[in-house]
Amino acid sequence: MPMLEAIWQSGRLTNGGQFHAELERQLCSHLGVKHLSLFANGTLALVTALQALRVTGEVITTPYSFVATSHSLIWNKLKPVFVDIEPGSFNLDPAAIEAAISPETTAILPVHCYGVPANTAEIQRIADIYGLSVIYDAAHAFGVEANGESLLNAGDLSVLSFHATKIFNTFEGGALVCPDLKTKRRIDYLKNFGFADEVTVVAPGINGKMNEFQAAVGLLQLPNMPRVIADRQRWYRRYGELLSTLEGLELMPEPDGVSWNYAYCPVLVRPTFPCSRDELYDRFRRANILARRYFYPLITDFPMYRQARQLPLPNARQAAEQILCLPLYPDLSEQDFLRISDVLTSAAGR
Ligand SMILES: *Cc1c(COP(=O)(O)O)cnc(C)c1O
């Protein structure tokens, strides 16, 4: 593999090597963002985003996400405040955000769940009135565009994850998208122990750097993304056709007016379906098929969050009980799709 040899010969295995620089450049152009800083993973990018903006006190966030979202607050000794998601979408409800604001609130940490845009206009309106920072956990939102613009330009900062389970991956990896060079410099210091130069340390930064091997993996994958998304779209629509024939199962509709990435395949298992979401999940397991309960349990149900301030969460709770994400990947085979449909149709009692 010539890239491995190039890394070795350059004598720079990490700390901002040639592939790191090249991947930052290519990702900015691919995603349509001004600046971006690569990270070893998305969680360290989240932790660093909160430090870059000097967030303090309380942060309003969603219980319907992967735990890393709120863990990043705990790592910064911030207090998560959990509010509900919108009925009919899986994203934070702006009205609930506004209702939860206290004198301690300094920021909002929404997620673009399943890559579907959060209500960025309304969230920004609230943030502007109350003087809050907005950091988007955009771990699902690689390449998503709304109104012809990258969704990653919403808010103050956006965090990407390039974990192996995400649509674009570097095995482990992530990035922080920011609007200006000054912020990027600060983020670059913070991900490298706080070093501003050889002898100056400006903050208790973490080691969040992406290494050259990860960057090379990203460079190899990036040209495939249009095909990856086209294949995912094809399979998503096949699922749509199948599920439209099964009473009680609803595939999440594709978001309107959005160039979406088909990152997940969430299906609502309604009470009218002959078996529960968990029974359906077990049927898949018995057939040796891994469907995922993204996101169950709710973050607020984990012991370390039970004391956290929270508003009523009926919509999040319902989603956590009814959603099952079906296998969706570009090289899904016709044969595997048939195995998956067999489980669905037999559970439906056909
Ligand atoms: C994957 C994910 C993360 C964490 O990213 P890592 O790269 O695995 O650290 C954070 N938030 C959400 C919503 C995710 O799905």
Image (cartoon, rainbow, N blue to C red):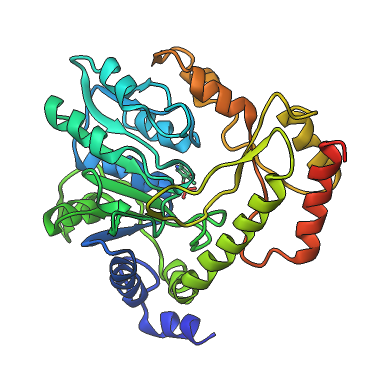
Q: Residue at x 37, y 32 (%)?
A: 75
What residue appears at the point 40 percent right and 72 percent down from the top-left corner?
Answer: 13
Viewer-proximal residue among 117 and 282: 117
Q: Is residue 325 visible?
A: yes
In the depicted structure, whether residue 82 falls above or below residue 248: above
* 120 vs 5, nearest the viewer: 120
Give the residue displayed 55% in from the left and 19% down from the top.
301
Task: Choose top left, top right, bottom left or bottom right for residue 92.
Answer: top left
Percent x, y for residue 223?
Answer: 45, 76
- Pick whichever, 40 or 205, lies toward us: 40
Q: Is residue 222 left or right of residue 294?
A: left
Q: Is residue 297 visible?
A: no
User: How far across and down, in percent of the image, does residue 350 sit?
Assistant: 88, 41
Left or right, 23 with reference to 307: left
Query: Residue 312 placed where, x, y %?
Result: 44, 13
Is 56 in front, or is 267? 267
Q: For this view, does 83 lie left or right of residue 303?
A: left
Q: Percent x, y for residue 117?
A: 37, 44
